[in-house]
Amino acid sequence: MPVARLVALAALTSACVSNPTPCAAADVCADGLECLANRCVRAGGQPVPDNAQRQLLQLEQIGVWSNNHPSASLPPVVTLGDAIAENQLILRFAAPSTELHIQSAFLLLHPDLQAPPAGQPLQFTVRLLSAPWAGKGAPQHAGRIGAVGTAQPHAPFSLRIDVTEVARQMQRWPKRNYGVLITAEGNATPGASYQTGSMGGTPQFEVYALAAEATR
């Protein structure tokens, strides 16, 4: 059985932010740019400042909404973008501290290497939930896409989505931090399979930030 080979490309979508071009190799980027952290950035530059500190936000809630029903228990693997299983992943992480000046943030989903590769490229969307999810009714969101990423059946890398703007909104309105909804646009057979953490491979939310005193 072929192992799942997924290389992640990610791009922040925001009406007021310039979108970096997603990449998996240097030949995707325009002249003067190179591929770093799955984004085309200025050649010789870095995806985050040298003095930025990496922090992992604590995962507080995880759930799977499958075919218009909640999963009875958390499965070890969730398949997204599948033509038959209409799965959605709900994640809620602790809000970043207001003392941090966020430079970049990434959501990481780790592939199930025992599953077959996705049948086609998939586009993933990350939306902020507009209400708490109690695990019964369908997760509610405002409709606005906070971030997008794409996965190709190519290499066994984690799906890495640039969620910088999502992290800043979580920080700005911590009382409205209800979580995020992750879906995959596509009609693949099979879809892309990721670990949920019940048996390893817990989803991660990385924040690269400067402490308040470092910006004074």
Image (tube, rainbow, N blue to C red):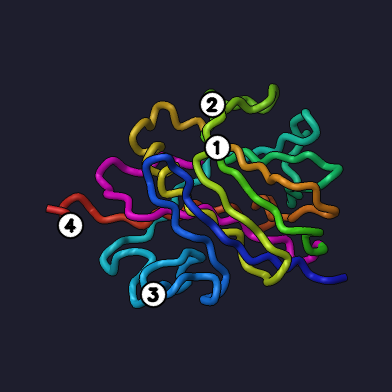
The answer to which of marks 1 and 3 sits earlier in the sequence is 3
User: Of discs 1 and 3, which sits in the foreground?
Assistant: 3
The answer to which of marks 1 and 4 sits earlier in the sequence is 1
The answer to which of marks 4 and 2 sits earlier in the sequence is 2
Q: Quick check: 166 left or right of 172?
A: right
The answer to which of marks 2 and 1 sits earlier in the sequence is 1
The amino acid marked with disc number 4 is Ala
**Residue found 44% across the figure and 42% down from its top:** 14
Task: Give how far across and how far down residue 113 sits, in percent.
Answer: 74, 66
**Label 3 SS:** loop
Q: Are marks 4 and 2 in contact (CB under 8 Å)?
A: no
Q: Start and end of the magenta stretch? A: 93-115
Residue that badge 2 annotates? 142
The answer to which of marks 3 and 4 sits earlier in the sequence is 3
The amino acid marked with disc number 1 is Arg
Task: Give how far across and how far down residue 62 sits, in percent.
Answer: 61, 40
Residue that badge 3 annotates? 32
Residue that badge 1 annotates? 127
Residue that badge 4 annotates? 214
Q: Are marks 3 and 4 in contact (CB under 8 Å)?
A: no
User: Of discs 2 and 3, which sits in the foreground?
Assistant: 3
